[in-house]
Amino acid sequence: MRKGISIGKLSKQASLRIAGLMSGTSADGVDVAIIDFSNTLKVLAFDTYPYPPSVSKAISKLFSNEKTQVSDICHLNFVIGEVFADAVLKLCRKSRISINSIDLISSHGQTIYHNPKGSRFGRILLRSTLQIGEPCVIARRTGKTVVADFRPADIAAGGQGAPLVPYADYLLFSHKKKNRIVQNIGGIANLTWLKASAGIKDVLAFDTGPGNMIIDHIAQLITKDRYRYDVDGRIAAKGKVDTSLLEKLMQHKFLKRRPPKSTGREEFGAAFSNRLYNTAAKAGLKPADIIATVTAFTARSIIAAYRCFLPLLPDEVILCGGGAKNKTLVKMLKEQIKPAKVLLTDDFGINADAKEAISFAILAGETIRGIPNNIPSATGAKTPVVLGKIIPGKI
């Protein structure tokens, strides 16, 4: 039996070794990062472990409301807990880092539904969110204290439960003289605005709209599942952007909504992508042209958010997430944001794929110390709160 460290002792440690677990809206696998976190950050190991095909298929089923059963959600909650725990143990073995040296595990879980606009309960408008991946299973399998389920505390405080990574962005990328945007392009794209010399209360952050989600879905449709995404943006590079369709896409209500705001599959998932694809195909667009157009939609919606909702344009844009590898998308962004410099988090020593897992590891480190780690200016929460639920490991 692996012996854990009490929560009281963990809260007083000057340095923590934390394993961060993250699976985003793309739901393609588990990102695992192991860091040493104190006044400085050192990334020790990172890898991504794809979901087993049966698990991936089951998660996709949950995204279709008409096909979802409560029993499926219940079962998959524990399945994903096992998958997450296994991912930590695999990375420890691969990197030769003893599981006994890990102080804490941070798990964002797998989002299956996020409702930032809210629904009525009597006279009250209640926002809600649901992430699965049972943290008690992770704690039991690894013997380590787990911090998980970060979004609900912010929602309970009146926020949207997203975005949460801006806290880590501020610690890692704020600069005294440069205005920066940290632009994550996962399934959904989101930004963190870091004004030069600004304090944490001045940070702005919000979802800009679709990231890879629509591109990935349509790539699967046109390749009949041979590819899960447009590798390096190669398909888009062969196509021509249909300006008429692009203009229609840019009229989406979410893009006009003022921050704080967040979104997900509920607005830009399979149903939206299928309608878009069918409309484009009926209009006679070639498959490569459709991919080129939705890639342009992601790029343009990101830049439109900068111009509409930020106090001024950035000196530097720092990219992370899977979209940072899409060469066609990055080229479009560079062309539209000149003369700002476009960089990767890799240029700062942080793997662009690992950045969100690292961010949630940082959040867990602050949680265990009782430090508020949401940013109300980003989420709309009424007050700062300590995020997450703490599950003790084996004692």
Image (cartoon, rainbow, N blue to C red):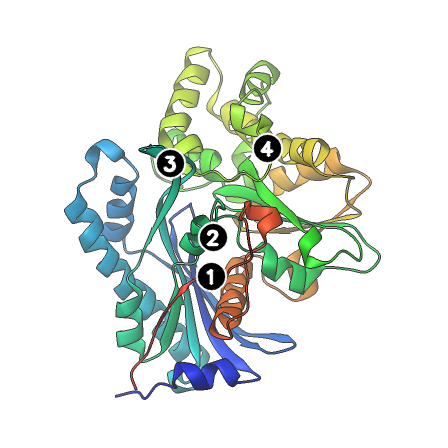
Q: Which residue is denoted by mark 3 in the rendering?
A: 124
Q: Nearer the viewer, mark 1 or mark 4?
A: 1
Q: Residue at x 25, y 88 (%)?
A: 1
Q: Which residue is denoted by mark 2 in the rendering?
A: 154
Q: Residue at x 32, y 88 (%)?
A: 3
In the picture, measured across the screen, residue 323 lies left or right of residue 113, that is: right
- Real-space CA distance between mark 1 and mark 4, rounded to the nearest whole angstrom: 41 Å
Q: Which residue is denoted by mark 4 in the rendering?
A: 237
Q: Nearer the viewer, mark 3 or mark 2?
A: 3
- Real-space CA distance between mark 2 and mark 4, rounded to the nearest whole angstrom: 40 Å
**Cβ–Cβ below 8 Å for labels 2 and 1?**
yes
**Cβ–Cβ below 8 Å for labels 2 and 4?**
no
Q: Farthest residue in the left direction?
A: 71
Question: Which percent across, then down, holds residue 138?
Answer: 30, 70
Query: In the image, what residue type sits under mark 4?
Result: Ala
Question: Which percent across, then down, holds residue 157?
Answer: 47, 51
User: Quadrant of the image for the C terminus?
Assistant: bottom left
| Mark 3 / mark 1, whichever is N-terminal | 3
- Local crowd at mark 1 within 10 Å, few (<14), some, or many (≥20)? many
Query: In the image, what residue type sits under mark 3?
Result: Ile
- Real-space CA distance between mark 3 and mark 2, rounded to the nearest whole angstrom: 17 Å
- Real-space CA distance between mark 2 and mark 1, rounded to the nearest whole angstrom: 7 Å
Residue 218 at least partly seen: no
SS category of the residue bearing label 4: helix
| Mark 3 / mark 2, whichever is N-terminal | 3
| Mark 1 / mark 4, whichever is N-terminal | 4
